[in-house]
Amino acid sequence: MNANVFPLILIGATVFTGAVWLLEAFVLRPRRLAAAGDVPDEEPARPAVVEYSISFFPVILLVLVFRSFLLEPFQIPSGSMIPTLEVGDFIVVNKYAYGLRVPVLGTRIIDVGEPKNGDVMVFIPPHKNEYFIKRVIGVPGDTVTYDEDKGLTINGELIERTLVARIPPARPNTIVYQETIGESVHRIHTSVHRGAPSKTYVIGEGEYLMMGDNRDQSDDSRRWGFATDENIIGKAFAIWVHKAPGFKLPTFRRNGLIP
């Protein structure tokens, strides 16, 4: 779904129900009472659209405020962040971690914080109007090199990683490393069958280099460029439920903070 569809629907519903509520309070109700003459035993019935609008307006407004400025749930649709996030994970995104923003427009109105290397961030990429989730590898001012051995160097410092496993052990297809970027200690997957030419990225003002933890199975900044400040949605910080594809019940086995 287009990233702006649901926010626009929510804003439209809030404006409509709020306008009906105001119209009822200041125009429609006084007219009904005047038409009824003396105060009747029972107030004339309100039209159904007015009744529903008055009932739903506070609820929709609360959802809009909460979703736009505080927390928002997302579901992981792909395996680009394996092993940190699996397909079917439902995550919670902190919408105010990087500043309060105008819904849909993305304009920051209050500064709170900035993305840091190692953060897992939800954003809209430059090539597609959809939500993406990747790890922040480079922030404005950084110089990042992704070398042929699939290691990272940030501002001349080689990022620490240690071997965790070879899957399967005898003839591995996947190598699992533990990687430390900033304050984040997490695991990544690399494929033994895919090469990666060395490349250096210089990150400019308002730009962020994003990569998936499933390094060789991720559509990220290495292909389409940098994420930009105005398209940041928020910081992903927790998994609250997991629903595997198909007819399977949700489970809470993966609940916890995102490293």
Image (spheres, rainbow, N blue to C red):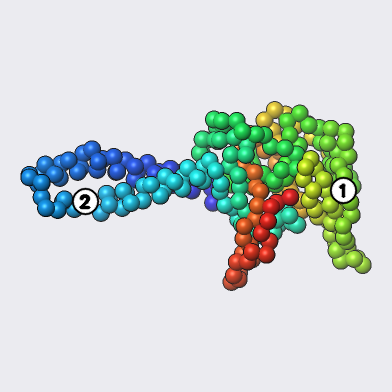
Residue under numbered circle 2: 46
Relative height, residue 259 to residue 227 (above, below): below
Callout 1 touching callout 2 (CB < 8 Å)? no
Name the residue located 59 percent from the left edge and 35 percent from the top edge. 99
Measuring from the top left, give residue 128's x and y in whole percent. Answer: 61, 44
**Extreme-bottom residue of the structure:** 247
Disc with the residue nearer the chain's start (1 vs 2)? 2
Which element is circle 1 on? Answer: strand
Residue under numbered circle 1: 161
Q: Quadrant of residue 88?
A: bottom right
The amino acid on which the numbered mark 2 sits, given as a three-letter code, is Arg
Relative height, residue 203 to residue 258 (above, below): above
Measuring from the top left, give residue 213's x and y in whole percent. Answer: 76, 51
State left or right for residue 188 relative to residue 90: right
Measuring from the top left, give residue 129's x and y in whole percent. Answer: 58, 44
Name the residue located 24 percent from the left edge and 43 percent from the top edge. 24
State left or right for residue 35 relative to residue 86: left
The label on residue 215 is: none
Measuring from the top left, give residue 36's x and y in whole percent. Answer: 9, 47
**Extreme-right residue of the structure:** 170
